[in-house]
Amino acid sequence: MSMSMRRQFAVVAALAVLGGGLALAPGAGAAQTSAPKADGVSAASCLGNAKGYFKDANNSPFHPMSGWYKTTSACNDIQIKPNTNRYVAVCLYKGGCRGRKLAKAGEWTVLASNVATGTQYHFSFRSTARSTGKYAA
């Protein structure tokens, strides 16, 4: 690869990371940036399709309280990014709940990996307190 091509690649990669809001600190639970995954799905496209959630303070730790979310072809993983630190698990309609993890405020946390498209799931929070943030699946 020529020096000019390497320089162009570096500029494009830097713009993708900075422009996409994916500049993440390294560490456990942090989502990948724009590197392609094995089946061609990238974290950038996955997190670019993230949706907001609002879990009201109530008697239930589950969100949504009724019904299920469904995974999309945009992601291989189920991830959450709460606005405050939360212990949360993901529960699959067919497969039960995975162990709770500490999802840190403002950081993407992978709760389940290699999940098939169309899988139904919900979140199980340790607390019934109000919680807001984003999720991607």
Image (cartoon, helix red, strand yellow):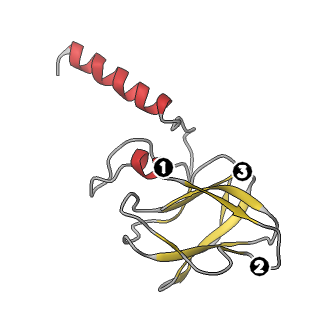
Tell me where residue 125 appears, x and y as whole percent. 71, 70
Tell me where residue 108 appears, x and y as whole percent. 58, 51
Question: Marks 1 and 3, Cα distance to the nearest angstrom?
Answer: 16 Å
Q: Amino acid at mark 1?
A: Leu
Name the residue located 48 percent from the left edge and 30 percent from the top edge.
19
For disc 2, the neighbor class at 10 Å (few under 14, some 14 to 19, many from 20) is some
Residue at mark 3: 83
Q: Is residue 126 above or below residue 12?
A: below
Which dot marks residue 47? 1
Q: Quadrant of residue 82?
A: bottom right
Residue at mark 2: 60
Q: Furthest residue to the left?
A: 1
For disc 1, the neighbor class at 10 Å (few under 14, some 14 to 19, many from 20) is many
Q: Is residue 50 above or below residue 124?
A: above
Q: Secondary structure at mark 3?
A: loop
Q: How many marks?
A: 3
Question: Marks 3 and 2, Cα distance to the nearest angstrom?
Answer: 19 Å
Name the residue located 74 percent from the left edge and 75 percent from the top edge.
61
